[in-house]
Image (cartoon, helix red, strand yellow):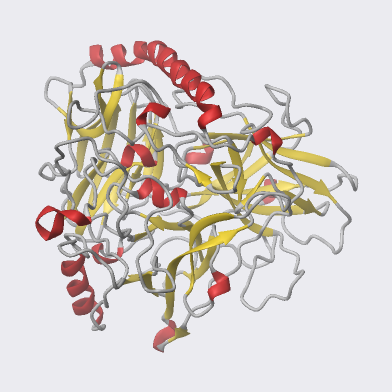
Amino acid sequence: MVDRRRILQATAAVGAATVISQRAGWAWAVGQGRAGTLDPTKIRKYVTPLAVPSVMPPAHRGEGGLARYLIGVRQFRQQILPSNLPQTTVWGYGDVSKPRSFRTPSDTIEARVDRPVRVTWVNDLVDSYGDFRPHLLPVDPTLHWANPPGGDAGRDSRPTFTSTPGPYRGPVPLVTHLHGGHSHEESDGYPEAWYLPKARNIPAGYATVGTFYDEFGAEFEQRYGAAAWKPGTATFQYTNDQRASTLWYHDHTLGVTRVNVYAGLAGFYLLRGGKSDLPPGVLPGPAPQLGDKPGTRYYEIPVVVQDRSFNADGSLFYPASRAFADDAGPYIPEGPFPPIWNPEFFANTIMVNGNTWPELEVEPRRYRLRFLNGCNGRVLIMKVSANPTARPAQADLPIWQIGNDGGFLPKPAKLQQLLMGPAERADVILDFTGLREGTELYLINEGPDEPYNGTFNPSDPATTGQVMRFTVGRLTGKDRSTPPEDLDLPWIKPIGPADNTRQLSLDEELGHDQSIELMLGTVGADGHAMPMHWDHPITENPKLDATEIWELHNFSQDAHPIHLHLVQFEILGRGVDGKQPPEPGERGTKDTVIALPGEITRVKAKFDLAGQYVWHCHLLEHEDNEMMRPYRVG
């Protein structure tokens, strides 16, 4: 039985958590002057057209329609801020044969249901001399992380220090995860399967690959009869044997995901076709395709919303000290607190598809927007309003949600606002039909500038409370798409009855009322959390093809978006007893769910591929400091 007293204590603690969150928000507000030297109120809004991600070209297509890609990670400069301000040095993915294809967010991989895709991912973070590029952002070497300096014996560990270290400045480890994908273990982007670039100056004694890299490389070679992975690369194959859906890819290296993604490593992966999709013409389109001519009009657009802070020279700002967030201490090794890692970071500028506060000129017709919350830690609550600064804002255009992480919903949901945790996706239709030319509408954000727990103050309406602007132009052709209220969405095969139920915990280790680390674990027989570190023995081990219910008991003070690799799950309920039904936009299947403090969130999934995977919080700062656990199927 669940310890009701502990759950009720956690529920009561929401009030205290609000105070803590307000303190965190206050610390953030005080820190705005240190959140980069570029004042976000001085950045012009709505002067840059919304960039529409291009489609990633395959290197070639082999027998059976297998699309093969050669995709690298490189450093480059991009005009993220308006053109009157400097460019920003970032990282991104691109076609290695086309240097100008590198961008953040990166090109979209277009895939078809039941047609596999094979990608060779190249860590190309080297300069023109072949030397490795150090990280753009401060890396805390005191966490349990990839730790290349530890050599083969000390990699993927928490190193010890005799004095408080500065940021790591060595070669950067990478491994890419297809978020939402249904992949064998060697192609999932396991956090300990990272690899360094093939650089000429890797320091002697450094581990060049993670603990699982060689094992998974051999497994891939055996499974597909493929050539061995070459240094600085890994080749993954995505089966695409799942529902048509909005996926995305991003870095997933142990202990450095937050800074690798913040530097720019993310892109869309759109899976189309099969019985779980709708015929062409039913939904607004076209979407971008290979070979499109310049000026092609798109009525289906992938949209990733992220927050970033900048310095006056255009460079990205990310905290280089724990002192940015609070006065915690003493630091490792004199005390328990990591010297650089921050429990959360809320940047002061909103970036959409790689530009700050862009504008999209729309026709008076329907548009399909495939939203992704790509923020490290910010929960978004978005509305479409004619007034960008009023709070609470009036929703002047409904948001029709037709899909989420796992594909289409059972039926369209008419929403006044769209709540999205980090990593969640929402497939929506905005209907501008009948609006006069020149009408201006704004996508605004009422989510907090602090940790989300259900009770909060809205974000700053002058900065992070605004996302992008829609300006209505003239109609250029007839809209033949189906109105969202009339859509008949594809049938969803239910997940069968469960074979087992697990009780799992979300908790945090506190010191001096400040977070040392966030942790996952199990729930003991006495109803209390039993937190575990990343390297503790595996406790979640579903049998192959088992269907399980996972009950997520949140004993912490904040909400956490929990992501399970490999599977798409049904949300069964949440609340103090776990019986409150999911929201309309959460029905169908998902891979990420917001677990609120003081509540039990219940999900059900079928674990149908044997192997080692992970489940974790998708607040990236939490994930990087112990709020991630391995699990093994079979």
Left or right of 387, for residue 139: left
Q: Residue at x 23, y 35 (%)?
A: 164
Query: In the rendered image, which quarter contains the N terminus?
Result: top left
Question: To which quarter of the image does residue 469 belong?
Answer: top right
The image quadrant where one finds the C terminus is bottom left
Looking at this view, is 94 or 405 the one in front? 94
Instruction: Name which residue lies at 28% across and 17% down.
Output: 7
Q: Is residue 77 visible?
A: yes
Q: In this view, does 348 lie above or below 214?
A: above
Residue 346 or residue 334, whichever sits in front: 334
Q: For residue 448, say whether it is visible.
A: no
Spot occupied by residue 274 in the image (x, y as percentages of width and height)? 49, 68
The answer to which quarter of the image holds residue 508 is top left
Q: Residue at x 33, y 34 (%)?
A: 602
User: Where residue 210 appears, x then y in whole percent?
Assistant: 20, 60
Tell me: 476 left or right of 625.
Answer: right
* Left or right, 120 with reference to 455: left
Image location (x, y in percent) of residue 282: 67, 61
Rendering coords of residue 423 (x, y %): 45, 46
In the image, residue 494 sits, relative to residue 621, either above or below, namely below
